[in-house]
Amino acid sequence: DVKVTQSSRYLVKRTGEKVFLECVQDMDHENMFWYRQDPGLGLRLIYFSYDVKMKEKGDIPEGYSVSREKKERFSLILESASTNQTSMYLCASKQDRAPNEKLFFGSGTQLSVL
Amino acid sequence: TQLLEQSPQFLSIQEGENLTVYCNSSSVFSSLQWYRQEPGEGPVLLVTVVTGGEVKKLKRLTFQFGDARKDSSLHITAAQPGDTGLYLCAGVEAYGQNFVFGPGTRLSVLP
C-alpha cells in the first residue's frame, strides 16, 4: 500500500521553541504539501514543493518554512512556535501536476503550543 | 482567494436515513474532489468530478457536479454508522497544484 508517514501523531511544545514536523512518502511522488486543519476553517495550504529543493508559498506561510532535500521527505519548520500555531498539521503528496490527480494524506500531527 | 462553503456544518442522523450535503463556490473549478476523513486519520479521496453536470455513484453515495462547475452535492442513501466522518470538498484550480478545501460537513450516523 502507498503511504505518507508523519513522524509524530501528537506533539507538545513551548512558545518560542523551534519545531520540526517530518513527512515521508514512499510513492516517488514529485509534489508534496503541508496543510493545517482548524475546526470550521478546513484545510489551509502552508507550503508545497513540486521538486527536490523547490518550494512555493501557500495561503498561510507566515511563521513557517520548509525543507525538501530528498524527493521522499518534506519537512515543515516552525522557527519560533507560537500559541496560534496550535493545530492539526497534515502532509500530502501527489503524483504529478495533472489537475485530477488525488492527494494522499498522512495521518496528521496534532501540535499543541503552550 | 477562492472559497468553498459546505452545508450543513454538522449532521446527526439515524441509520437508514438519506442525506445530502452541499459544496458551493462563486468560482469555477477545473474539477472537484470529495474526501472523507475519519477521526485520527488523514482525508481519503472518494471521488473526482470533472465535467459540468456529471453524476458519479460509489455504492450508496451519489456525487453531482453543477452544470457551471461551481458547486457539488453528495447524497447518501440508507446511511450506515460506517459513513460517520468529516466530508470535505476540494476545488481544483486549472493548473492542478492548488486545492481549495471547504470547511467540511461532520456526519454522525447513529445505530
Image (cartoon, rainbow, N blue to C red):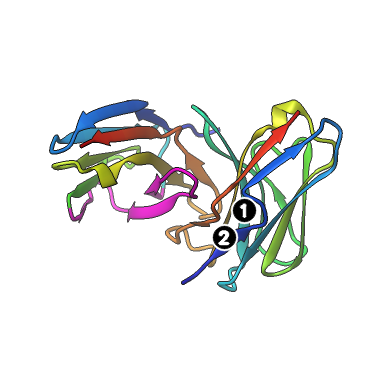
Q: Is residue A33 above or below residue A86?
A: below
Q: Please name the residue that numbered disc 2 is placed on.
A: A93
Q: Viewed as shown, does residue B68 lie left or right of B4? A: left
* Residue B48 lies in quadrant: bottom left
Picture coordinates of residue A59 (x, y %)? 64, 38
Q: Chain of mark 1?
A: A
Q: Viewed as shown, does residue B75 lie left or right of A83? A: left
Q: Is residue B11 magenta?
A: no
Of helix, strand and loop, which one carries label 2?
A: strand
Amino acid bearing label 2: Ser
Q: Residue at x 70, y 64 (%)?
A: A73
Query: Callout 1: 10 Å neighbours few (<14), some, many (20+)?
Result: many
Q: Please name the residue that numbered disc 1 is placed on.
A: A33
Q: Is residue A86 above or below residue B75?
A: above
Marks 1 and 2 sit apart, C-alpha to C-alpha, by 6 Å
Of helix, strand and loop, which one carries label 1?
A: strand
Q: Which residues are magenta?
A: B30-59
Q: Which mark is residue A44?
A: none
Picture coordinates of residue B75 (x, y %)? 21, 40
